[in-house]
Structures are given as C-alpha cells and as structure tokens.
C-alpha cells in the first residue's frame, strides 16, 4: 500500500493489482473476482454479471473515461445506496474536474477524486479512498471506496469500478 494523497480528513491509497484480496475487508470476494478476470489486461464492466455483485448492488459506481478529456468521466452507474447517502444520482451524467469542488467530502465527487481515478487508470493500480462519515444520529463511521480499473479493449484502462461501503 502506498498513500497517493491525504487531503484533510480523506486518504487515497493505491495497491498493485496482485494485492492480496484479504487486505480489502468487506469486499474481498469482489477483489478476488476482479483479479480472476484479469488476463493480459483488466476486465471490462461487460465481463461481469450483475449477480456477481449480489449484496453490493446499491454500492456500485462505474465511471467511463471520456476520450480526449482525461479528467472527465461519464457515470454509467451510480448505486441507489450511494444516491441515498449523497442525496443525488449522477447516473448518465458527465463529470469533469474543472466543474467539481476540490475539498474532500464523502457526498461529493471532487476534482481530487477524478485526478485519483486518472492516476489509477494510467498506473494500473487498485485504489482505496476513505474518510469520516457521520450518520443522522451523529455516530462517526468510515466511508470507504475501493476502485478497480477496467478496460473495454483489454489494452487501455478506461473504466473505474467503485465499490463503496460504510464501516462501523
């Protein structure tokens, strides 16, 4: 594990694709699945079945990078549980670093998040970002998101699969 950046209360880490799945508590099964689908390059989103993500459906986000705009992504999927927490749904929308805030916040995809996604795609790394999350009743928890690079062609990483979770 290597820290890419710490931004106030938010930490961005990265790992080699071969990192032991056990180092990703709560999502080990999904990291192992992703690793099993890696051949010459990373799998594409289309290489998975929705049933592969049973128990995580509402916690998934898929970003497609926009050709020619390295810090822009089209949001293919924005999970319902994440939409509830954030109080918005980005499915089908384009997000670009120029239009995003820079301060870390678990309910906002920031310019820093998009720069991090680009780093993970370019360097072929597994990501893990985490920071504080406060529920309605005031209990402090951790919001954690694992990022797995995907490749539609098998040659160039151009999608990011995000698996989020609230750690009690």
Image: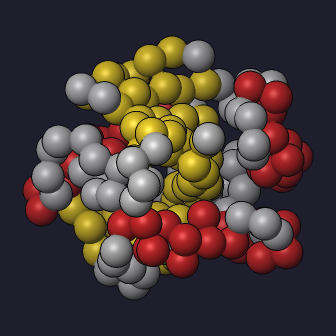
> In x, y percent, where is residue 167?
61, 42
Q: Is residue 112 above or below residue 98?
A: above
**Which residue corresponds to the image point at 33% horizontal and 45% vertical from the top-left?**
113
**Which residue corresponds to the image point at 49% horizontal and 32% vertical from the top-left?**
123
> In x, y percent, where is residue 68?
27, 61
Q: Is residue 51 above or below residue 100?
A: below
Q: List the single residue furthest toward the front.
A: 137
Q: List the single residue furthest toward the bottom.
A: 92
Residue 62 shows in the view: no
Is residue 23 toward the left or the right of residue 164 in the image? Answer: right
**Camera-side residue of 137 and 24:** 137
**Camera-side residue of 29 and 75:** 29
Q: In this view, does 38 lie above or below 158?
A: above
The quadrant in which the N terminus is found is: top right
**Which residue corresponds to the image point at 28% horizontal and 57% vertical from the top-left?**
108
Q: In which quarter of the image is residue 115?
A: top left
> In x, y percent, where is residue 130?
46, 36
């Amino acid at each position: 594990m290597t820290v890419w950046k710490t931004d106030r209360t938010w930490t961005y880490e990265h790992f080699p694709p071969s990192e032991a799945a056990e180092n990703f508590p709560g999502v080990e099964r999904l990291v192992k699945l992703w690793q099993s689908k890696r051949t010459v390059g990373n799998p594409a989103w289309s290489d998975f079945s929705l049933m592969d993500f049973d128990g995580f459906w509402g916690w998934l986000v898929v970003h497609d990078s926009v050709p020619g705009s390295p810090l822009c992504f089209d949001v293919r999927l924005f999970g319902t549980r994440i939409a509830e927490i954030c109080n918005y749904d980005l499915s089908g929308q384009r997000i670009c670093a120029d239009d995003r805030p820079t301060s870390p916040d678990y309910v906002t995809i920031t310019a820093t998040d998009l720069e991090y996604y680009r780093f993970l795609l370019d360097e072929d790394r597994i990501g893990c970002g985490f920071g504080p999350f406060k529920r309605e009743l005031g209990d402090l928890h951790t919001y954690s998101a694992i990022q797995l690079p995907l490749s539609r062609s098998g040659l160039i990483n151009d999608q990011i699969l995000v698996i989020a979770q609230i750690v009690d």
